[in-house]
Structure formats: C-alpha cells, structure tokens
C-alpha cells in the first residue's frame, strides 16, 4: 500500500480561486466607495426649499412669454458652432441670453449672449463639439429676465429646435 502525501494548500486551485473572489470584491467595493466620495451628486439641489419657492416666479416668466406671443426656433450649426435664433412675437430686445443646461451635470452648463441682427434674427457662438442632449432656456437679460422660453435639443444636429413658453393655453 502506497501512501501519497497530500499537496500543500498553496499548490491547489480552489484556495486561490476563493481568495481571488475575495480580493476582487474588496477591490471593486473600494473603488466604488472612492468614486462615491470624490464625485458630487449633480442631480441633488442643495437649496431645494428656495428652488421650490422660485418655481412660481419661473412660471410667471413663462406666462409673460406666452402673453407676448413669443416663440423661437434655434439651430446650432455643427460645423461652425454658430447659433441662429429666429424670435417671433411682440418683444425683440437687442440681446438674448441662451442657457444650455446639461441634464445631469451642473458643471457642464453653458451661457451665451446672442446679438440682434435683423427682423428677430439673433446670432451667437456655441462651444465647439457640442454633444448630447441639453435643456435650452432663452431670456432677454441675465439678471431678472421678464420672460423665458424653454426647449430641448440633441447635438450635433442640422435640425431646428422649437423654444416655447412651456405654458399650456387654457383659454
């Protein structure tokens, strides 16, 4: 009868496999914990109470745009990044301000000034390589605008996007 000596544990497959699973889960959870601590939650409003109170003021601005029969079409040329806005309605200021709001990351938001050229046409310059989906806000001044038009668009695109007051006509 021949006795075989068992191989040491460190030369076997299963202990290393189980240790590999353990270290993989430790590494993965540590990586996710570091990412959670270092990145900010872009969707969370820090001043949610003030933001909630401001909704009525925003609705009043959109109602004012509706009362002035304002609407706009916007196009951002994918080759030159030129912004072309055609504004219809009863108010045509010398400048318009366009906010591009990224849905999930507030630090990517952009603001541009558009100059009145003629007959409700405004021109400006967008950042190069504008990509993905954005919320659009158009208003006549940077501080306390009287009205506001809203819309959304996905870029790059040759299409025109409509900006409206965002108010449903109940009359």
Image (cartoon, grey):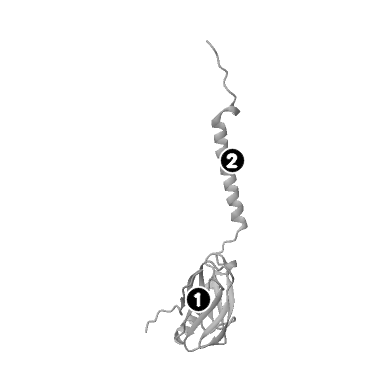
> Where is 94 relative to 11, above or below?
below
Return the residue found at the far top.
Answer: 1
| Badge 1 vs badge 2, beta-carbon distance below 8 Å | no
**Residue under label 2:** 23
| Secondary-structure class at tag 1 | strand
Residue 10, position as x, y percentages in the image = 60, 28
User: Which quadrant, please, contains the C terminus?
Assistant: bottom left
Query: Disc 1 versus disc 2: distance between alpha carbons?
Result: 52 Å
Q: What residue is shown at x 59% (from left), y 61% (from top)? A: 40
Q: Is residue 41 visible?
A: yes
Q: Is residue 23 above or below residue 101?
A: above
Q: Residue 63 vs residue 124: left or right?
A: left
Upstream in sequence: badge 1 or badge 2? 2
Which label is found at residue 75? 1
Q: Position of residue 107 (x, y in %)?
A: 60, 67
Kindly state the secondary structure of the residue where label 2 is placed.
helix
- Whether residue 46 is visible to the viewer of this picture, yes or no, is no
Q: Nearer the viewer, residue 52 or 31?
A: 31
Residue 69 at x, y percent in the picture: 44, 86
Residue 118, percent from left and from top: 53, 88
Classed neighbour count for the residue bearing mark 2: other residues with Cα under 10 Å, few (<14), some (14–19), many (≥20): few
The residue lying at 40 percent from left, 79 percent from top is: 168
Asked where in the image residue 3 lies, by quadrant, the reply is top right
């Amino acid at each position: 009868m021949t006795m075989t000596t068992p191989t040491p544990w460190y030369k076997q497959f299963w202990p290393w496999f189980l240790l590999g699973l353990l270290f993989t889960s430790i590494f993965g959870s540590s990586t996710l914990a570091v990412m959670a601590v270092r990145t900010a939650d872009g969707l969370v409003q820090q001043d949610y109470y003030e933001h909630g109170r401001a909704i009525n003021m925003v609705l009043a601005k959109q109602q004012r745009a509706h009362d002035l029969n304002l609407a706009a079409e916007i196009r951002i040329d994918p080759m030159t990044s030129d912004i072309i806005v055609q504004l219809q309605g009863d108010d045509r200021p010398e400048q318009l301000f366009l906010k591009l709001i990224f849905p999930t990351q507030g630090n990517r938001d952009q603001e541009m000034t558009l100059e009145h050229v003629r007959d409700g046409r405004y021109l400006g310059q967008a950042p190069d390589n504008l990509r993905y989906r954005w919320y659009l806000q158009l208003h006549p001044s940077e501080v306390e605008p009287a009205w506001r038009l809203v819309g959304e668009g996905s870029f790059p695109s040759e299409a025109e996007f409509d900006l409206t007051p965002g108010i449903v006509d109940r009359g």
